[in-house]
C-alpha cells in the first residue's frame, strides 16, 4: 500500500466514522445535542461544529481556494444536528473526491496555509491530509466520550480498516457508496527452484 492509498482510505474512514457518529447524534433526545458537557469544547454541538470549521479551513488550503483563515473565521455554526450532519457528509464526500484526484507526486507538493499573524506557511499536501485526519479523530473521540453521558450509547468507530471487521461495516460501506474494499491477501513468496 502506498501513502496515497492510505490517505484515500483515511478519507473514506472519515466519511464512515462521521456517518456512524452522526447517526448516534441524530438519535439524541431534545436538549442533549447542545447541553453543557465536560470537554475541550463544552458541548457536542460546539465540538462537531469545530470539526467542520477546521475541515473547511484545510480544504481551502489544499485546493488553493483563496479564503485563507477566513474559511474558519467566517464559519457560521449550525444549531441543529441534522443540518450539521448534512454539511459534514457533503464535506466528507468532497474530501474523498479530492484525495481520489491526487497523484503520488501531489503529496509532496506545497500549498500555502494562512496562519494569520504568523504568516503564509507552505505545507505539504500529504502532511495537511494526515493532520486533518488526526484532528478529526481527536475531536470525534471527545464527542464519543460525551455521548456516554447521553441517552444514546457511543458507536464503535474502529471497525474500518481490517478485513476481519468487514462484516461489521459492510452495510454502511454499501449505503455510503464506498464499495467493498478488496480484501488484501498476504502470500508467502517462495524462491524459484534452481
Image (cartoon, rainbow, N blue to C red):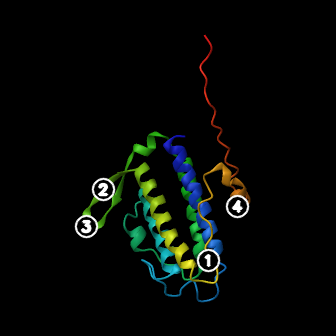
Pointer 1: what residue?
25
Task: Assess disc 1: are there few (<14), some (14-19) or many (≥20) residues with their C-alpha within 10 Å of its C-alpha.
Answer: many
Residue 99 vs residue 70, the one in the foreground: 99
Q: Which residue is labeled 2 in the image?
A: 121
Q: Real-space Cα distance between discs 4 and 2? A: 38 Å
Q: Is residue 188 at least partly visible in the picture?
A: yes
The quadrant of the picture occupied by the N terminus is top right
* Residue 103 in the figure: left or right of residue 182: left
CA–CA distance between discs 4 and 3? 43 Å
Tell me the residue at 66%/49% (across/down): 163
Mark on residue 51? none
Q: What separation in Å lies between label 3 and label 1 (alpha carbons)?
A: 36 Å
Residue to which mark 4 is pinned? 172
Callout 3 crowding tier (Cα within 10 Å): few <14, some 14–19, many ≥20: few
**Residue at disc 3, secondary structure:** helix
Say which residue label 3 marks. Answer: 117
Name the spot of residue 45 as percent of width and height, x first.
Answer: 52, 80
Label 4 or label 3, whichever lies nearer to me, is 4
Callout 1: SS = helix
Amino acid at each position: 500500500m502506498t501513502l496515497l492509498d492510505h490517505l484515500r482510505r483515511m478519507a473514506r474512514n472519515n466519511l464512515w466514522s462521521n456517518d456512524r457518529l452522526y447517526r448516534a447524534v441524530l438519535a439524541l433526545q431534545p436538549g442533549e445535542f447542545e447541553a453543557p458537557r465536560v470537554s475541550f469544547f463544552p458541548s457536542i454541538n460546539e465540538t462537531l461544529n469545530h470539526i467542520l470549521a477546521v475541515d473547511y479551513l484545510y480544504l481551502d488550503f489544499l485546493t488553493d481556494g483563496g479564503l485563507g483563515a477566513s474559511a474558519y473565521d467566517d464559519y457560521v455554526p449550525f444549531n441543529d444536528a441534522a443540518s450539521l450532519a448534512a454539511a459534514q457528509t457533503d464535506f466528507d464526500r468532497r474530501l474523498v473526491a479530492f484525495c481520489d484526484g491526487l497523484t503520488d507526486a501531489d503529496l509532496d507538493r506545497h500549498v500555502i496555509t494562512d496562519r494569520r499573524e504568523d504568516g503564509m506557511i507552505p505545507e505539504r499536501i500529504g502532511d495537511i491530509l494526515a493532520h486533518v485526519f488526526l484532528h478529526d479523530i481527536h475531536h470525534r473521540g471527545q464527542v464519543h466520550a460525551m455521548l456516554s453521558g447521553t441517552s444514546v450509547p457511543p458507536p464503535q468507530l474502529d471497525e474500518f480498516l481490517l478485513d476481519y471487521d468487514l462484516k461489521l461495516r459492510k452495510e454502511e460501506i454499501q449505503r455510503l457508496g464506498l464499495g467493498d474494499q478488496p480484501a488484501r491477501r498476504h502470500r508467502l513468496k517462495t524462491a524459484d527452484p534452481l
